[in-house]
Amino acid sequence: MNRIEQAAALLDDAARERREVDPYPADAFTLAQAYEIQRASIRRRIDRGERMKGVKLGFTSRAKMIQMGVDSLIWGLLTDAMIEEDGGIVDLARYIHPRVEPELCFVTRRDIDAPLTALEAADHLEAVAPAMEIIDSRYRDFKFSLQAVVADNCSSAGLVVGAWSRDFSGLANAGVRMQFDGRDVQIGSTAAILGHPLRSVVQASRLLNAAGMSLPAGSLIMAGAAAAAEPLRPGLHVQCQIGGEASGLGRVAFNVR
């Protein structure tokens, strides 16, 4: 087993066994090698019977890019085992030290197999939904380098997706409100996602093409966080509202056990 496969096995086992591991130092792998580790780790999951469902984007806000000293997005892969039920119960026993952040999720209606322009992006989408991503670094104390987080599938662990809408007209600057037990914990705007969430689809197409990958019709694209992540704890009711109550995109929610 080479270094890439060893690292992939370590991170995959940590996720399955719900245990922390020490993060790799920044100079342990190049960024390209980190993506190799990520894909090798996901292959192990596919070999166990999970199915690919799409991609997630990270560092979609300029502040996050500056914080990490990078000038481009990072991305991870989604499988069906990561999907939690809207309105259902999220069991913290499945995770190590999970946090939740408000997002938008797109579903594709056409294959994405080449870089898209901004004008082409919407034509490749079937619908959009309010969503929340559960991130859960496998690294001790949730601390890591850029290469380490990429290798760990960009901390992706779970996602909850609300009702789908085919109306993309109000995405540019919709209000985002995430609540714990009815109290606001994060308030933001979809404009925090690259200035407009559809730009995440453009970026996803470019990143996939550079990696020699494509995205089949019916795939999910988690566009990136619209506000900061919050730690989860048992007993919470978590809700995210995108846009206004009457005319917004809608809401997504879950309970924590």
Image (cartoon, rainbow, N blue to C red):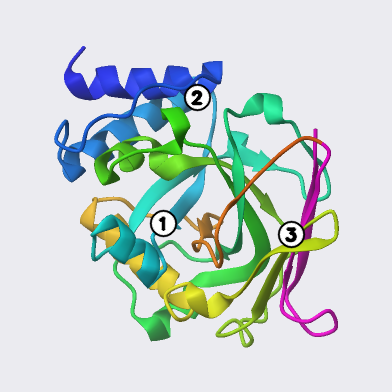
Residue 58 numbered tag: 1
Q: What residue is shown at x 49% (from left), y 75% (from top)? A: 192
**Position of 29 relative to 103 (above/below):** above
For label 2, the residue is 15
- Which residue is nearer to you in this view: 181 or 194? 181
Residues marked 2 and 1 touching at CB (< 8 Å):
no
Residue 162 is labelled as 3
- Using the image, determine if residue 169 lies above or below residue 255: below
Horizontal relation, residue 234 to residue 218: left or right: right
What residue span does the magenta drawing correspond to? 235-257
N-terminal-most mark, 2 or 1: 2
**Which quadrant: the C terminus?**
top right
Horizontally, residue 162 falls left or right of residue 217, namely right
Q: Secondary structure at mark 2?
A: helix
| 57 with respect to 1 (left or right) | right
Q: Is residue 108 visible?
A: yes
- Indicate the quadrant where residue 18 lies: top right
